[in-house]
Image (spheres, rainbow, N blue to C red):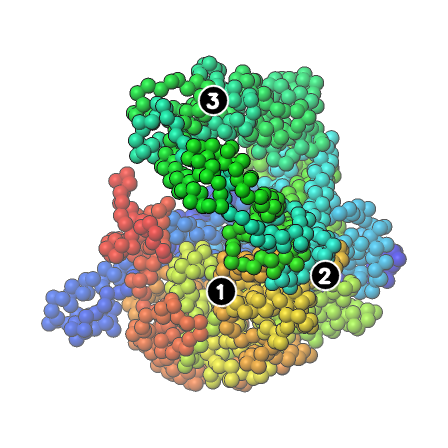
Amino acid sequence: MSATDDSELRGRVRRLLEFLRETVGAQSKPIRQYGTDARVEWLFDDARPLDVNTDVAPGDVAVRIPRTSIEQPPGLPAELEKHIDESTTPPTVAKQAPAEAHDWLREWTTWSLDDCERRPFAELFRSVDLMLHDLGTQPESLELVIASGYLDATIGDQRVATHLITQQASISREDSTGDLLVTVAPASTPRLEDVQILLDLPGFDRAGSKSLHRSLSELVSSSLSADIPRLLGQWATAALKQPLTVIADHDKPVSSTADTLRMSPALVLRKRGSYALASYYEAMLAALDAGAPVPVGLSQLVETHEDNTRRDWLESHVSDTPSAEPLFPLPANRAQAGIYNRVMNDTGVVVEGPPGTGKTHTIANLMSALMAQGQRILVTSEKAQALRVLKDKLPAELQDLCVSVTDMARGGSAELDESVSTIATHKAAFDATESARKIRSLAAKRMGTKERRYKLTKQIGLARSSEAEIHTFSPTYSGTLASIVTTLNSQQDELGWIPGPLHTETAPVDNATFASLFTKSQGPSLPTADEIRSLFARAGTASGSMFDDIDPVQLQYILPSAQALTDRARAIASFGPHYAALADGILSGALGTLWSRAQTVSAMLSVAVSSDAAVESHHVATQVTTRQALNSFDALAKLYESGSFDATRTSSEQVAVDGLDARATVDGTDATQVTELRLVTNHLRALVAVDDAAHLLRSIGIELPINPADSREQQVNTLHAVWNQVLATGSIATARDELVGALGAVVPSLPPVTTLAEAIALADDIIALSGGSDASTARDELTTLAERLSSDPTVPDGLADAIRTGDVDGYERLVSYVQPQNKNTDLLEALAEHAPTLARTLSEDTTTDWSAFAPTFTRAWAWRCTKQSIEAAQQPDQTDNLDAELDALDAEISSLTAQLAAEQAWQECLQRMTSREVTALRAYQENMSNAGLGTSSLAQRYRVAARAAMQDAQTVVPAWVMPIAQVLSSIPPQQNAFDVVIVDEASQAEITSMFLMWLAPRVIVVGDDKQCAPASIQNYTLESVIERLDYFLPDVPVTTRMTLTPRSSLFSMLRTRFGDAVRLREHYRSMPEIIQWSSTQFYNEQPLVPVRQFGADRLAPLRSTFVEDASTSGSSTRLSNAAEANALVDQLALCLAEPDYEDKTFGVVVLQGAAHADLIRSLIFERIPSEQIDERRIRVGTPPDFQGDERDVMFLSMVIAPGSSSKALTTDMFKRRFNVAATRARDQLWLFHSVTVDSLAATDLRRSLLSYVEAAPTVPVPAMPDAVSPTSPHPDFGSVFEQQVFLALRERGYHVNPRVDVNEMTIDLVVTGAAVRVAIECDDDGAVDADELLSRMEREFELRRCGWLFHRLRASDFALDRERALDTITELLDSVGILPDEVAVVVEGSETSTWTPIALVRDPDDAEPDEEAVELVSVEAPAPSRTVEVDLAPLPEAIETVDEPVETSDLDDAAVDEFDDTDVSDPTPVRTMPREDLIAAIRYSQKRNKFSVAQTMEDCEVTPDAVQEALAEIKSRDDALNASKKRPSAPTPDAVPRRRRSADVATESVVVSGSGSLQAELDALPVASWAGAREIAIAAARPNAPLTLERCQRVTGLSRTKADQLLSDLVVLKKLVTRKREGVEEWVRPQGLTL
């Protein structure tokens, strides 16, 4: 089929685009007056003058908003109350009042003057600070602009009161002062928005403003420019047919009946419009009408295409289909690799990515692989937060090819500038031949490393399957090691009596001969001749020696030196004759200076070793190894490293290398790159050092035994060994000198010792002296023996005489006559040669009846030899070393893959570049250089020219990352501008995002239909949308049409069009306990697999806090719970101060009610310094706000309280919300609730979540199996060996589970502690399939990368020494914090379990939108009264937004009932005034003493009941405020995980106002605390940015006197220390102080 030739299909696609254009148009109604859609702060206001930079250039600061707060009015002492009337302005002092009253009035007057000056600045700071917060949390929905050209006129019959000229801006907080800086967006230009505002109004001439649009962008650099008034005057004349008064001043506009156009610049935070999206669809329709081919991605939305149809379309329309192996630089599992394979063969892939399953990781891999294939990629998402870390996950080499625009306030111009500039630089230096060579080299290295990895995995596989090998140690013992050891163990008692070691496998004698050893012989027992000789030797002395006079005590001090000399002399003799000759030369001094010169070898060896280590495992080969070659290659490497290499000419260094006529290679490829040249240099340096050392050694008579064929490493090792022997030889002189010195004190003259032989003789003479005491003993033994023999009548007298005369030979002759030779002695000596321990035992142990063992002698010998052989073979397991080597290879492959992908991507990018793009790159660089930082009209023209060049130059960037809203402003609507579009969090992308399928022929959508869905289309009901679909697409089947409703997302639409989705299941984000609830509750059919591991010191994953006596106010989106909000913020403040939470990030998700989120946000802004909010990334929002985001610690607030009218939350909307809310936490999840489980319906999601968190399992661990036998197979185990290990570990007190499935791998045993798990793999002797083993190994490697710890236990080790094997496991468990008997949790499957998931029933009427309304209020407040009872806190407060009433017509009744918490009363005919505005009006009247119910009813057009309700609310707030002053301190940090909080303790004195009136919010604020200013000062007093008195004033908002007092107090409390620098006093935090 040909999509372009099918007119019917083309018509349907066109009507689909018309439907989408109309849908977008419904959301694009022009905003002609500021209201709830914008927050406006005028830049020129006499009440708070600011220093505005009207000459600001893009990227510069336009205005600074100083941090300011309001101090408390002076308190009136009780004793003065009767003398002062505070109801007047100013307060009135009675005539007879004491002097103290007048003093108080003067103090009050001073405060009042200061308050009038500071309050406008404080109000401005609060407002702009909230703008900053809202921009950070809702960048896709809101934008900040600096606006000018305020049009206040009636055009036709429409009132217009808005700005015409805007320019993007951003807000940042200055670290040193806390001030807010408003910056013009870099590379932005002013925009004239008259068409968006005035289109279709009579009297507006669009054609007349065209030229002004062009002039504005070309001549004006900012919306504050002095040229703006002149352009406004031209616009008023050319674009409007009615008269208009143009006013050039910058002041805040005043009320006027005339139609005016004035400069009046302002800072405006507003909703992003849909004008760009509508223009996109207009351009797409125009392209189709002009004959553009119908994209298959859009056509399949209105007509079903088979897989082969889409493939045919790809082949005919896309020529550069990606192929080859995907270059994934990050670890990838099979599911991720499958995505790449699918996108190669189809136009789209759907990826189901539940929370935390590594979607960003997967997209980064896909980007790398596709960029390496030359593909242009757009990665987008509904929300920027899902994309912010994506670019950082790319290899550094690829990041310059990617433009990431996730800060929408900045617009991404800086990132684009940097990328384009880098590409231009690469283009200028690009060498296609060199690039191709480098790609071949990297590919070869990568292939070689993968081959090494393959061989290593084979080696690991062999090691792990070794238990199944058959071993034969003897005919008796054959089989696997485990079976042989089992047999040996069973024979231990019978055959284990022979001690080892044995030195022969075969017994030296048979059983009978062994038995003959124990036959008794006849005759007298006489010593042998050898024994007599020994006695005579001991009894003899060296009489006549010069050392005879050495005292025995002195000898004890001399003997160690003699022994040391002997030891060294013997070592030298073992080295060989050359070393003995060297020793003679050293001792005699004949070597002279040659020996001193030889010491240089130590330095040469050090150079050789370090150079060899620098080469690492690379194979370097050179044909020449001379010093000249070393110097030439070293000079060339330094040239490359300095960056001075010029490829256009041949350097002298290169000439020198070429002149060697010697090829140098690294890993088989020529060395031409700087890293390769440095490797060659180190290789040569090592070899030259070895050669130099050999020359020096030869001069002292030592030849270095080196073969030219030896490798570099072998030569270095040989030098190392020889030099150690030379140093050992040289130490003989030191030993000689020590002995001679020791003897010098007792022997007057010693002969010189100049040879090794003389040194040995001297040492032997001294050692011989130590035998003197032993000689006396020996002589006594000889005398005793002679006496015994002379008295024995059975022996001749000649024996005694032979001993007395020392005739040993005569003694030996006589003994042979008297006593026949003992054959047993010869047999025992023969046995000692093969079994020395056994022979010694037989000689010494005379009590054992050894003859009883003789029948088993040969079998026992075989038993001992076999066990001895097995023990020798059972060396410590080398698997850990192999695993570490494998990890190193994986890291090397990842690095090489990243380099190869980057090199290929750069080659594809630069070779694909057209001449037009090259010209544009050069023009862009030239114009930006000329523009500089100037603000003149000429500089602006250069910038305009640079932007025009960028339109062509930006197409060279192969990868873009940005939210969908930014795509509309950055990417032109050009068909197939990209090769692949990847949409993350596609379940949040509404149907109007289908324009993305126009931008590329392939799309990858990543999402999850169990997470938050798109918001409903504004100004449309579901019924009206279906009617429009029926109108536009009547020829499309109804089943297809119904997938295009507001309930659908881009994800859900494409999932029905493509084949089976690729599902990611491995969960990497959260602790297992945190993700278990969502996995079981929402993904029970395919549960998520938590693979994250954790340490023994982790936070408790689940915590719950119950707030007693809480109550709610409001309903629907205005529902809030003050007690619960205060309890949550209390705990947050405690966590921020605890060391366990250091560096942790925090988020707060409100499960129901946007007003509750506003309340918590206000409390946080009051209690926590802004710097800490930024540092800890503290964010408050609803579940849709947090989708795609995560924090270390998440606080969930359930909001409802007893007495709230609330139905069970069961709709799909709440299922998605709760799933998102519960899966944002990485380390810890807190749940704050004011109701108990019993008060919630059985089908309520809140009940399910609360009961799970309250159960708070330490780990999701199943129960251990029962009735496990060590011999009989059990169905829960894979082998009997696993059962034996299980029983042994269980006996030691550990919680062990068999056959645990993790990441498609079944782990044999998992030992679980309270905070960590360890995998035990049991290698038994069962047969192992090679493919299964390889697959299992790869799964294990993936788990190890996720932090899992594995230990392998061999069956033979366990059988051979069970206790030692278990001790090894115990040591490992102790090291990671797993202790015996520490798991005491409710285990899954036990009868006492307290949580089960609720049944999920899909609600067919679930139509409620997921998004909270985004609304803004202006901060126009009435002038402050003369006295304010409640003032601004020292920290900036949040200005709450007003939610529009829920349009029940847009929702199904069922959805409204579920969302609303109170009954909805019938509307009244009286005008509805917002409740908070009414409260503000009453408070204002009361303060002026002009309040009356009747007057309020008349002025505000409200009913009496409304006034009474407002008065009751005012009283309630005042009571809460008074109660807060008595509030006790916050709970201690060591509070238990779940605690009950009393409402009177938990309720803060903060009542959040939803009104646009600032005065109402001021009245509801608590009394400012001195502690708040202390927190700010301590946090701001950093060592690298110390506090001065002036800076303390700015960051705290205090007066100079108060700030000085505050700093003094903090010094006394040792919270700060003071110092002076350059005469200025500074304050900083003392070292070690924790905030």
Quadrant housing the N terminus = bottom right
Disc 1 marks which amino acid? Answer: Leu
Where residue 448 appears, x then y in whole percent?
Answer: 71, 40
Q: CA distance from mark 2 to mark 3?
A: 62 Å
The mark nearer the N terminus, 2 or 3, is 3
**Is 340 drawn above or below residue 1455 in the view shown?**
above
1128 with respect to 1624 (left or right): right
Q: Nearer the viewer, mark 2 or mark 3?
A: 3
Q: CA distance from mark 1 to mark 3?
A: 61 Å
Residue position for label 1: 1379
The mark nearer the N terminus, 1 or 2, is 2
- Residue situated in front as seen by the camera: 185 or 1460: 1460
- Residue situated in front as seen by the camera: 874 or 530: 530
Residue position for label 3: 756
Disc 3 marks which amino acid? Answer: Leu
Where residue 1137 appears, x then y in whole percent?
Answer: 38, 61
Residue at the location (57% across, 50% down)?
521
Q: Nearer the viewer, mark 1 or mark 2?
A: 2
Residue position for label 2: 1326
As helix, strand or loop, the secondary structure at mark 2 comes to loop
Where residue 1167 appears, x then y in whole percent?
Answer: 38, 64
Where residue 1285 appears, x then y in whole percent?
Answer: 60, 65
Residue at the location (70% across, 52% down)?
473
Q: Residues within 10 Å of mark 3 (few under 14, many from 20)?
A: many
Disc 2 marks which amino acid? Answer: Gly
